[in-house]
Image: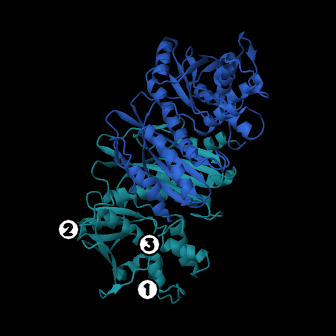
Chain colours: A cyan, B blue
Amino acid sequence: MGEFDLIERYFKAPARAMQFNEVVALGIGDDCALLQPAAGMQLAISSDMLVEGRHFFADVDPFTLGHKALAVNLSDLAACGARPLAFTLALSLPKVDEAWLASFSRGLLALAAEHNCSLIGGDTTQGPLNMCITVFGEVPKQQALLRSGAQAGDDIYVSGTVGDARLALEAMRGNVSLTADAFTAAKKRLETPTPRVNLGLALRCIASSAIDVSDGLLGDLGHILKQSQVGATIDTSAAIHLNTINFIAAQAINTKTTTQLIPQLTSQNQLQYVFSGGDDYELAFTAPVSQSQAVQAAALASKTPVTRIGQIEADLGLRLINAKGQSMPNNYGSWDHFK
Amino acid sequence: MGEFDLIERYFKAPARAMQFNEVVALGIGDDCALLQPAAGMQLAISSDMLVEGRHFFADVDPFTLGHKALAVNLSDLAACGARPLAFTLALSLPKVDEAWLASFSRGLLALAAEHNCSLIGGDTTQGPLNMCITVFGEVPKQQALLRSGAQAGDDIYVSGTVGDARLALEAMRGNVSLTADAFTAAKKRLETPTPRVNLGLALRCIASSAIDVSDGLLGDLGHILKQSQVGATIDTSAAIHLNTINFIAAQAINTKTTTQLIPQLTSQNQLQYVFSGGDDYELAFTAPVSQSQAVQAAALASKTPVTRIGQIEADLGLRLINAKGQSMPNNYGSWDHFK
């Protein structure tokens, strides 16, 4: 099967069936796609590239890979409070494996359909497995959530759970051992992260700044601090509850199961995964104290738990404290693809 | 040098210095870039991925590679008659080679500056060398040049020269031998193609259809025929003059140089390169006969030669004729990455 037939069957034909919104004036099939944003709207744009061996293992389920390739991009739209509209997909494939492509396409387009996000163009070529998605969303002028808006006194929040993806990765590498339930839960978070699009939309005009947590919580929070020219204090006793595995362990204890779920997991490396795990695709954001009820209402409306983990301060730098308010060392680096 | 420093030095810092237009509301440095198209404008979007060993050789000059990575995308905007605004760059690199990056960045940003096209975001990761650019342009509503607008009776034109890039490739592969001058000219066309942006802009409201010639002239013209539901007859005696090497040979003869420039090049494989060479980044377009003077004026205004090579007809299919109007066989395939 040639390149053109392949594109037609697995991408173009389904794409024509999923023109979800009126902003897409012309979809797949010409030299360019055409978007026509509504009056007063800005177009939010983000691009992410996923590479075999770096972002995923060669034997990963192609359905979950299709999901994740789009999810990591939708997560960037979420962090800006933008509503998903459309995306392009550039795909480099070692060979034409129809079963693989069919599954990849299903995973990708299922998440696209969930968010009314139309596939409007792209490119296919032969080469080492690599996928690059560029995603487009809309946000009313002046309402985009930026990294630069945090103010001293603002509360710092994190959505959902963080550290699970890293825990799954370390378990797959044999560095920690988990029960089957815990591993399944963590692996699901690694392979099919949920982009917090609805939370991002609900936080428009409430949050003062936001960022997508993809390279590790503290490192990404550092971008907010730098661009807002502020500092922060983080309460590690609040943050340590941010991972799913704790939640599962707590459930197990509550239901009188005595199994030790995390035999090798100390509170130290739990914090390590929470603070610098990476691959989380949650939102870290700030909001004025006066908006704390509005934040909880946004969390409720978008069915996304949020946890307050600290406060923005005028003093530059990032400080960690324990439950007693005592200072703790910050040894948590950020993910760097070249280190 | 880490990933973040690298991005800062070679991409972010220069990008901040080159915010060329008011449509870019927010450039590089947040989760998303923000574009604010002017009223009545549509956003034209295209994405292309270049892979080592497939689109370029490992030892290619990184400056020309930077140029070409953007040029092939600008060529898609040109084919739609869109004015370049901005682009994102996703880059997978085997390692951090500063000399390579500095040169790649210079080549990329020099062409960007020439077209007032701002780098607004992207991604960097470690992996086999791969670059994916998504480009954004603007075009007034209803004025985009599409593949679907050709009408029976329209003239068919091609800009500049085609077949040179393939000739250079075959010379590099040792399949044809060229004089140094001819090889230099052909290699320049392979490595630093000129996107026909100004011609595309000048053809708004004149051309009835257009396409970027990247996979071979006849194959790409076939997309216009299919999407316009028409056929065409191409005059091979006009088309054979479309390549630079002929032009150089003609010059050599005119200046009484007796050197045989193209020892192994027959008119048959000359036509092969012209019709199915690939990597040309010229425009193939159609226009009503009533617009023939306007087409020549657009060519003159944009300083881009155009050649009439045939005519659109109601009868489906693509027919080739010689100078005497006799029918010729069409054995010219299109480029397929998986064949």
- At 63% from the left and 19% from the top, the residue drawn is B232
Same subunit: marks 1 and 3: yes
B58 vs B291: above or below: below
The kind of residue on which mark 3 rests is: Val
Question: Contact, CB < 8 Å: mark 3 with mark 2?
Answer: no
Please state, as top left, top right, bottom left or bottom right, where the N terminus of chain A lies in the image: top right
Q: Which label sits on residue A290?
A: 2
- At 50% from the left and 37% from the top, the residue drawn is B74
A250 vs B30: above or below: below
In-front residue for pair A125/A78: A125
Circle 1 packing at 10 Å, graded few (<14), some (14-19), many (20+), is: few
Locate residue B200 relative to residue A43 in the image: left or right. Answer: right
Same subunit: marks 2 and 1: yes
Chain letter for mark 1, please: A
Q: Position of residue A244 (x, y in %)?
A: 46, 75
Locate residue B116 relative to residue A326 in the image: left or right. Answer: right
Q: Which label sits on residue A162?
A: 3
* Residue at disc 2, secondary structure: helix
Chain letter for mark 3, please: A
Q: Position of residue A205 (x, y in %)?
A: 26, 57
Mark nearer the N terminus (2 vs 1): 1
Q: Position of residue B161 (x, y in %)?
A: 61, 26
On the question of residue A161 being in view, the answer is yes
- At 53% from the left and 27% from the top, the residue drawn is B210
The kind of residue on which mark 1 rests is: Asn
Residue position for label 1: A254
Q: Position of residue A336 (x, y in %)?
A: 50, 67
Question: Contact, CB < 8 Å: mark 2 with mark 1?
Answer: no
Q: Which label sits on residue A111?
A: none
* Residue at disc 1, secondary structure: helix
Q: CA distance from mark 3 to mark 2?
A: 26 Å
Please state, as top left, top right, bottom left or bottom right, where the C terminus of chain A lies in the image: bottom right
